[in-house]
Image (cartoon, rainbow, N blue to C red):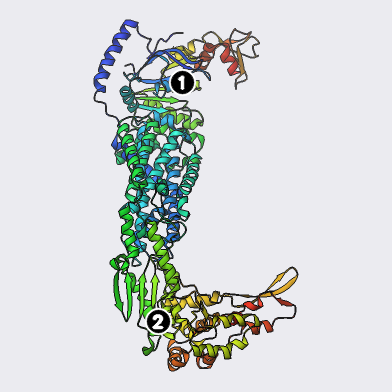
Amino acid sequence: MGASGGAVTAVPEPAVAEGIRLLARTVVALESVTVKRPGWPVAVQLVRREGRRMIRHPVMWGGALLSLALFGLFTWHSAPVLHRDDASVAGSLLPLAAAALIVANLAASRAARNATEELYEATSSSTGLRTFAHLLALGHAAGLAVALVAAMFAFMLADAPVGTPNAAEVATGPVVVVLFGAVGVALARWRPHPALGPLAVVVAVAVQILLVQPIVDDVATTSTVVTRLPWLAPWVPLSLTGDVPPELVIRPAAWHVLYLAGLTAVVAAFALARSGWRARLVPVFVAGAVAVALGTIGQLTPSSGSQRAQLASLIEHPEDHQVCEERRGVTYCAYPAYTAWIDRWAAPIEGALDGIPAGARPDNIVVRQTFGSYFEGPVDLPQATLRRAMRAEHRASRDQEPGTTIRTGTRWGRGRTEGGYAIGLALTVAMEAVGLPSSRAEMVPTEDEIAEFKTSVLPTLDERFRAKAEQAWRPGRRLYSCTTLHQARAMAALWIAGQATPATRATVTRSAAESSYGLQIYDAQGKRYAAYVGSFMPLYPEVPPPMWDRVSMGDVEFHYAARLLSRPDDEVGAVFAQRWDELTEPTTLTESFLDDLGLAPHVTIEEQIARLPDDVELERGRRNWTPDAFFAQTIPCF
Amino acid sequence: MTNVHVEGVVKRFGSTRALDGVSFEAGAGITGLLGPNGAGKTTLLRVLATVMAPSAGEVRILGRNPASPRDRLEIRRRLGYMPQEPGFHKNFTVFEFVDYVAILKEMTDRRERHAEVARVLQAVGLGEVESRKIKVLSGGMRRRVALAQALLGEPELMILDEPTAGLDPEQRLRFRETMSHLGEDRSIILSTHQTEDVAALCPRVIVMNHGRTLFAGTPRELAEVARGSVWLSPERAPDARLSYRTGEGRYRNIGAAPEHADLVDPTVEDGYLMLLGEEAFVEAA
């Protein structure tokens, strides 16, 4: 049956119909000249809607929290150095970037996944416009990233930071967030599948790890293109394995931001092209590709000889760069960016000086900031400079010249870890005050000391170590190391350092509590054994005093010192001040001070061994590794 | 005024011709589209909604040619479309979803848009549940959400694919009320399996089968197709093309006159069944 009747009119005759069509076409053609496509007003509304949904998404909040946690991991234990931590801030945003990828992917693929494409297609807003809006909505994610960056810097600014952040380093994090979000949108336009976002994150993490892997290796210099390849990754850490002074690394952060921005433009152009958007795409794509090319060339170009020479000068001629300041007889020399840290260095040193009787305070202490000579990551130094620095380090370790120079680095503790840094400075002062050797030059026994040693110590030594000790104790011979075990001055030095600041006090007290000094009984193969556990010195200063590795301070004195820290400082200080001359004599035993200090004698390892039950066997070979056995084969400091 | 002009439209999917030379015209008011499953109704509505281009033939909608991008844009600005299986973002609230579509329909003034969204939700009886997530709504309520978005902006042309599927009787009555009101000043093309809806709502009806237009006329004319072939009898007529027992205990037979039978006035349903022939009877049985 043909169409007929009612309001559904029959198809007109061909000639009439053709006339109607022609007229209609003319009218429509005239109108269509002025037809405007939906543009910014719709895009703005969509951006608001999609942006709000994006930053409210639980995955974004998870990413933001992980970013904050990562920032804490990077920076929690170190005093803020803004020209180093700016890179950490950027790296901290990687979880947020991953979240942006997933959430943007879910949002952009939502219509396809929920079968609303047909409905949306019938509206006047094209898929391209929606893609454009999804891309612009990444501005909300960037805003969240900027807010996190601001929070991170606010956290650091509250702790008297040093240095100045690099704007390009700071921008890297938010740009990576936008780039990852754009990748999420592009993937949604390529294959709208919810698993694709998480999968892309896994791939991105793998790419990031693979590209920055060379940084983990012990690469001494970044003077080749190959060592610059990590810069193709979204984020490049300063170092993954240890400390690299930021001053010795030339980071092409601005080129990297250009590279990332170019990638973002290319990816966005791809997403729009997949959505059928054609307008002005070619310029965007070309601009993005040019930015990627320029950024790649810029960031892969090795540092120049003159740049490396400038950095070498920092190490080889620190006096040309450092600022020195004298306070209470102590000289502090710091690179300009770190001069604010002189206050941090001075606090434990001045605290230690206050714990020493006025006439006995040392006045030759120098605190000098240094970059060290071994770096766990690439630095932009000439190989020759590295070799010279290592030789200088070796000479310093032999410490040909007497003196009390404390070399502190480009890191300082924060909160609980500050004491680990401060205690080293305080100990240097205290050890100097009580007469412990501060150089190997001071470790040459006199004739009288040799005579004393032969009459009083040598006969007590084990047969096996006697010959070795006799050989070591010869006139003019510089000793390799010595021990302060049972020396009262060691206890005093540890107490003086401990009482210097609240941080040093907490460090000594905590180390003593955590040190499992004594014998430990354990079961093995049906038998019970006892072994000496603990170290000879359970204190590990982050900034060790000179000769710290040569002067073995026994843990008996350490535990006495820790117990003294719970007593009033005035009382303890008075006892030490009253008997200062006697105290600083190497031959004065710790036990001679116990009564005056009100300390109960420490139970020695030997006494503990004597008290072992019959069924407990002392671990084979360990008998000679008790502190006294160690003392027996180590030369006492004098 | 002719708002929809379709002439010789063909749509092929591979070797299958979903539309095989469909021709009709529709002006203001409601046009019902009837046909069995696979007749090509949804394909035709997709073509009319500009989401699918025909393989051949001519389509003009609201005086414009949807093959032209500019015209297509103008058509879409005047169109309200409810697909057969509208998807939903189930984590959106009812309001959010309709509001999102409103943005896509270029309603960029936030205050005006929200007022319009509230209006269409009220019109479909969803005003009370606008803040509920779509995932907690029943199937019928979801179809009303889909209908609400089609009403946005008071479009000149509405294309509704099975809008009453899944609605309960009360909802269907409300739907009819809404449609009859809207149909007074615009074109509405709705496809349905419900001949009662067509009889109640549509001044015009088109019957399709195998991608072709079998009938275009009024519901009364469609019913007249079965004039003289519908009988009521005390027993089932063995030769009837379709016979079923009514609630009154008598058998309604379509086909040749059985013994002791009374000839009765045909309905739209009877006409539809007669029109489709044996195929419709097999489907109805």
Work out which quarter of the rendered image holds the C terminus of chain B and state it. Answer: top right
Q: Quadrant of residue A122?
A: top left
Which residue corresponds to mark 2?
A: A352
Disc 2: host chain: A
Looking at the rendered structure, the secondary structure element under dot 1 is helix
* Residues at marks 1 and 2 on the same chain: no
Looking at the rendered structure, the secondary structure element under dot 2 is helix
Pointers 1 and 2 in contact (C-beta within 8 Å): no
Number of numbered callouts drawn: 2
- Left/right of residue A171 with respect to residue A571 in the rendered view: left
Mark pair 1, 2: CA separation: 89 Å
- Left/right of residue A476 with respect to residue B72 in the rendered view: right
Quick one: label 2, few (<14), some, or many (20+) residues within 10 Å? many
Indicate which disc residue B43 carries: 1
Work out which quarter of the rendered image holds the N terminus of chain B and state it. Answer: top left
Position of residue A222 relative to residue A626, above or below, is above
Q: Quadrant of residue A606?
A: bottom right
Quick one: label 1, few (<14), some, or many (20+) residues within 10 Å? some
Q: Nearer the viewer, residue B102 or A310?
A: A310
Q: Is residue A405 visible?
A: yes
**Residue type, label 1:** Thr
